[in-house]
């Protein structure tokens, strides 16, 4: 293998993560929740269309963007309560 290929794809042993570690990652859950809530609030309030010239963007597009913001907010709530409200039984 050439030196250039070793830089692009090194031969390090890959550490396999267990499913428990991936599913119970609290920082991952908090980051996903915060990102979804902030992005959803941004889209719902209409700040995404703040600097536009009136009449250039169709109302159907604006409403679909706001609906996407609502879906992001609901996903953020779901993701935030996933660990303690929807706790699965340990076997």
Image (cartoon, rainbow, N blue to C red):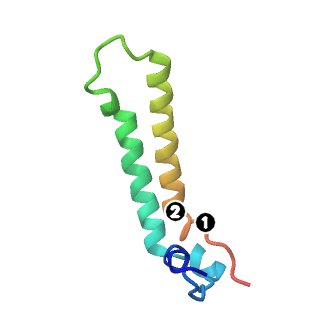
In the rendered image, the residue lying farthest to the front is 2
Residue 42, horizontal then vertical, whole percent = 35, 40
Check residue 6 in the rendering and tell me which mark sits there, or answer none.
none
In the rendered image, the residue lying farthest to the right is 91
Residue 65 to residue 41: above or below: above
Which residue is found at the position 49% from the left and 54% from the top?
77
* Residue marked by disc 2: 81
The count of marks equals 2
Give the distance between the C-alpha atoms of the residues marked 2 and 1, in whole angstroms.
Answer: 7 Å
Circle 2 Cα neighbour tier, 10 Å, few/some/many (<14 / 14–19 / ≥20): some
Q: Which residue is at the front of the view, 42 or 2?
A: 2
Residue 85, horizontal then vertical, whole percent = 56, 66
Residue 20 figure quarter: bottom right
In the rendered image, the residue lying farthest to the top is 55
First along the sequence among labels 2 and 1 = 2
Residue 39 to residue 46: above or below: below
Residue 23 to residue 71: above or below: below
Q: Secondary structure at mark 2?
A: helix
Q: Secondary structure at mark 1?
A: loop
Does residue 59 appear to the left or right of 78 in the view shown? left
Which residue is found at the position 25% from the left and 25% from the top?
51
Residue 62, horizontal then vertical, whole percent = 44, 24
Q: Mark 1 and mark 2 in contact (Cβ < 8 Å)?
A: yes
Circle 1 Cα neighbour tier, 10 Å, few/some/many (<14 / 14–19 / ≥20): few
Residue 7, horizontal then vertical, whole percent = 49, 77
Q: Which residue is at the front of the view, 7 or 52?
A: 7
* Residue marked by disc 1: 86
Does residue 18 appear to the left or right of 42 in the view shown? right
Which residue is found at the position 44% from the left and 51% from the top?
36
Which residue is found at the position 48% from the left and 22% from the top?
61
């Amino acid at each position: 293998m050439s030196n250039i290929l070793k830089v692009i794809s090194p031969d390090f042993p890959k550490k396999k993560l267990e499913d428990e570690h991936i599913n119970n990652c609290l920082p991952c859950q908090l980051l996903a929740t915060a990102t979804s809530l902030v992005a959803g609030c941004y889209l719902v309030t209409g700040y995404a269309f703040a600097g536009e010239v009136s009449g250039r963007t169709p109302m159907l597009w604006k409403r679909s963007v706001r609906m996407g913001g609502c879906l992001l907010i609901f996903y953020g709530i779901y993701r935030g309560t996933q660990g303690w409200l929807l706790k699965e039984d340990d076997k």
